[in-house]
Image: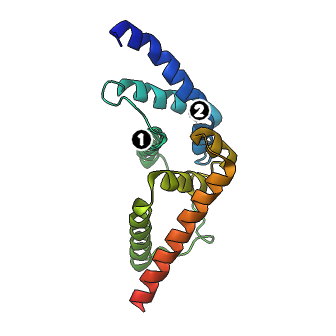
């Protein structure tokens, strides 16, 4: 493909990606309490970053797009945290939270590391569907449409991942007892 042909094909490709991922990205940001106007700006930023890396990444997976979105959120939270450090402290009600002890923090970190390691053992599509549904809360019908498979297939992938993780966790518990 010549350079002019490639440039004219890029808007079509990114338009298609935008149509496919705009809804899931909006859901991703709204679940993290991002206002809809800010979420729209962040979605635009995701696609700007995607276009900026187009020379190095010929094909972009959904995981890559959501990694960009996650990085944008981290940047946003860092920026807000810096701003709030200089602002007066807000009163925090801790009655609804358990005390975060070093032991509890360490146990939670270990559990997360185990689950992350086990997730990496799953086939890519199964892992992606599980994470997008269970952690990101994207509806199964939307995932089915995005991946071009049936809702039943999405359900089977999610069930497979859940069974796999439960078996791995049970085996670890048996080893530790």
Q: Give 145 or 33, whichever is nearer the viewer.
A: 145
Which residue occupies 45% across, 18% down?
A: 10
Residue 61's spot in the image, x, y percent?
Answer: 45, 38
Which corner quadrant of the image does residue 30 belong to? top right
Q: Tag 2: Cα neighbours inside 10 Å, few (<14), some, or many (≥20)?
A: some
Give residue 141's position: percent from left, percent from top.
Answer: 69, 46
Q: Is residue 34 visible?
A: no
> What element does badge 2 sit on?
helix
Residue 146 image point, x, y percent: 60, 39
Tell me which residue sits at (41%, 24%) in the image.
51
Instruction: Give the numbered dot on residue 75.
Output: 1
In the displayed structure, 83 sits above or below 92; it is above
In the image, is residue 115 above or below residue 153?
Answer: below
- Mark 1 surroundings within 10 Å by alpha-carbon count, few (fewer than 14), some (14 through 19), many (20 or more): few
Relative to the observer, which residue lies in front, 22 or 159? Answer: 159
Q: Which residue is mark 2?
A: 20
Compared to residue 104, the image places residue 29 above or below, namely above
Element at badge 1?
Answer: helix
- Outermost bottom residue: 177
Q: Residue at x 43, y 43 (%)?
A: 67
Q: Nearer the viewer, residue 108 or 151?
A: 151
Horizontal side of residue 102 vs 22, given as left or right: left
Quarter of the image containing the N terminus? top left
Q: Is residue 85 left or right of residue 23?
A: left
Mark 1 vs 2, N-terminal side: 2
The CA distance from mark 1 to mark 2 is 24 Å
Q: Quadrant of the C terminus?
A: bottom left
At x 38% / y 65%, what residue is drawn? 117
């Amino acid at each position: 493909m010549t350079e002019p042909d490639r440039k004219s094909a890029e808007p079509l490709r990114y338009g298609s990606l935008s149509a496919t991922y705009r809804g899931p990205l909006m859901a991703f940001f709204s679940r993290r309490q991002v206002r809809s106007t800010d979420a729209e700006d962040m979605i635009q930023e995701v696609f700007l970053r995607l276009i900026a890396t187009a020379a190095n990444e010929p094909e972009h997976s959904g995981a890559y797009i959501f990694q960009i979105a996650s990085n944008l959120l981290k940047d946003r939270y860092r920026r807000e945290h810096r701003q709030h450090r200089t602002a007066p402290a807000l009163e925090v009600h801790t009655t609804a939270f358990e005390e975060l002890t070093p032991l509890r923090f360490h146990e939670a970190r270990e559990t997360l590391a185990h689950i992350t390691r086990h997730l990496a053992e799953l086939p890519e599509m199964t892992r992606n569907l599980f994470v997008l549904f269970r952690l990101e809360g994207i509806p199964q019908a939307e995932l089915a449409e995005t991946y071009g498979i049936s809702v039943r297939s999405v359900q089977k992938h999610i069930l497979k991942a859940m069974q796999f993780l439960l078996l791995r966790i049970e085996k670890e518990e048996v080893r530790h007892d």
